Every structure is written in structure tokens, then in C-alpha cells.
Image (spheres, grey):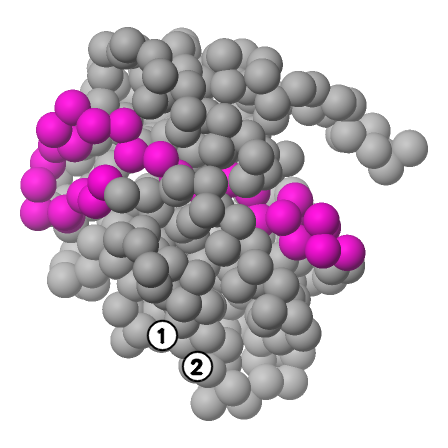
Amino acid sequence: MKQIHWNSNALNGQHILLDGGFAIELSKQDIDLNHVLWTAKALLESPDAVKAAHQAYVNAGADIISTCSYQATPQRLSELGLSDPEIDHLFAQSVSLAREASKNRNTQVAASIGPYGAYLANGAEYTGEYDIGEIALAAFHRPKFATLAKHHPDFFAIETIPSIDEVRAIAALASEFSDQAMWISLSCKDTSRLADGSLICEAVERLNDLPNLVAIGANCFNPEFASDLVVTIEKCSRKPLIVYPNKGENYDPVTKTWEAKSNEDFIDQVVELCRDRSIMIGGCCQIDSQAIKALGDRLSDTAL
């Protein structure tokens, strides 16, 4: 397994393989995710399924796996009736389950931190339409940062950030938690703008000087747009690049089904991103462990 170290501002020519979507691996185990906590519900009810999902990605060859904590926040867990010790235990368990799954390998663990929009559970992570500003956003995220930091993940994976106010809030917290390595991946509406319409380069420039930020990039976007999006980020970033697109499938709200696309289509598009560049690369929604293994195999077999 390849590893990265947060005090190095380069990937040294490597392709670091991330995991894929957590929901799809839990769904394979018939876990019902129709809940305000989404995948984090499994931490409360099905920890063995969480560990099995992690194990699938470890077996697929992922260099870094992310915890099942994207949509879990102290605020929401408190609203659901959990006590402070129970909340701390849940976040500790999110890290320990990932550690247990990867104990026989050098797989690193990233603690997943979703945006404020994930707490709202109304799709705001894809619009950036928030009802609070930068200071309140920092106050919202701080308890989760503090709790997860106590349990020593290798990284924070701060994901699907859709607004410039939230980027600024995360930047302030990154300075506050300066001993914790982290990356940030943005939610983008097109190849030049965040979901809220702000310029991607404005966000990246706010993050460039944070010494504990190991990478800047984007996640949960259509891989058809990946090449142009990566060019935009690289144009203004001084950090290593991280990208993990979704499968590019469209969801039909009437039939409640996904438009089917093959893993091979995704892999072909993503492998091109890895040509002539170091990158942290993986998948998001609808990308499973089989796709990650196939991606890793292609990266190993292809002269890039």
C-alpha cells in the first residue's frame, strides 16, 4: 500500500487509490439507508456491515479508506436522543471499524466530514443554499472536528463542500486544528464554479497556504466533466490533487432508480485523469469495490 504524509506537499509521482461510495456497499448487504443519518445509520444498527464495507475496499486495494461518518454530526445525533458519551463512542467506532478492517495492511484512514448541507439532508450540498454564514458554519463543524480528532484518523476527508462561506469556515478550522492532516473536496456546479456559483479558484486560493491540507479537489461530479474541472483546479492550486467522481448516472425520482452505466465507462474516464500527473483518485456515489479494484488494476497495468 502507498501512503502519503501530510508534511509533504507532493505525491512524488504516485497515484493514491481511494475507496468508492459507502452507500452502495451497504446496500449490497440489504442495509436500509432511508434515514436522516443515511450511511451513518449503520454505525448505530449494523457495525458489522460497516466493517465489511471497509474490508471490501481494503481487499480492492485502496490506499486510503474513509469512515462511515459523512452524514453524522453531533447536532443531529443529539437531536436523535444520543448522549454526549454515546456520540463520542459512535465517532470513535467509525474510526476503529476502519482501522480493524485494514489492520493487516498499511491502509490509511480518513474521517469523513460532510458539509452543512448533509446535516440539512435536503440536497443543499449540491446547491450551496444555506441559511447560515461563515461564522455559524465554523461553529457547526467545530464539535465534529474536535470529537474525531481525539480518535486519531490519519486524515479528515472534508467532502462535498458547496459554498465559499463553508470553504472559509473550513479554512479557519484547519488553522485551529493545525496538527490534524486533512483534505477538502468541493461540490461544483460546472467546471469553473462551486455549487453556490462562487469561483472554484477563489475557494482554492483561500486554501492554498494551509500547511496541514494535503490535497484540494472535488467529489461527486459527473466524470464526463472531470478533465476540464481538473484543469481549473490545477490552474490555481499549489496542493496535490484529489478527485473522486460519481458514476455519472442520472437518478429518476419517479421510478426511484439509477440510469445504468458501466464501471468500464467510469474507469476509462478516470484513468485519463491520471495520465502525466500525480493524483489521489477514487469514486463516490454508485462506485463500488469492484470498480475500485478494476481502477487500481488499470492504473497498475497502464503506462501513465
Q: Residue at x 51, y 59 (%)?
A: 68
Q: CA distance from mark 2 to mark 1?
A: 6 Å
Q: Which residue is mark 2?
A: 88
Q: Secondary structure at mark 2?
A: helix
**Identity of the amino acid at label 2?**
Asp
Give the main secondary structure of the magenta stretch: loop
Find out whether residue 219 is within the magenta segment: no
Q: Quadrant of the N terminus?
A: top left
**Identity of the amino acid at label 1?**
Thr
| The image quarter in which residue 88 lies | bottom left
**In the displayed structure, does residue 249 sit left or right of residue 169?**
right
**Sequence order check, earlier mark of 2 and 1:** 2
Residue 10 image offset from top left, x and y in percent: 12, 32
Q: Residue at x 29, y 34 (%)?
A: 16
Residue 102 image offset from top left, x and y in percent: 38, 58
Q: Is residue 41 visible?
A: yes
Q: Residue at x 31, y 54 (%)?
A: 105
Q: Which residue is mark 1?
A: 147
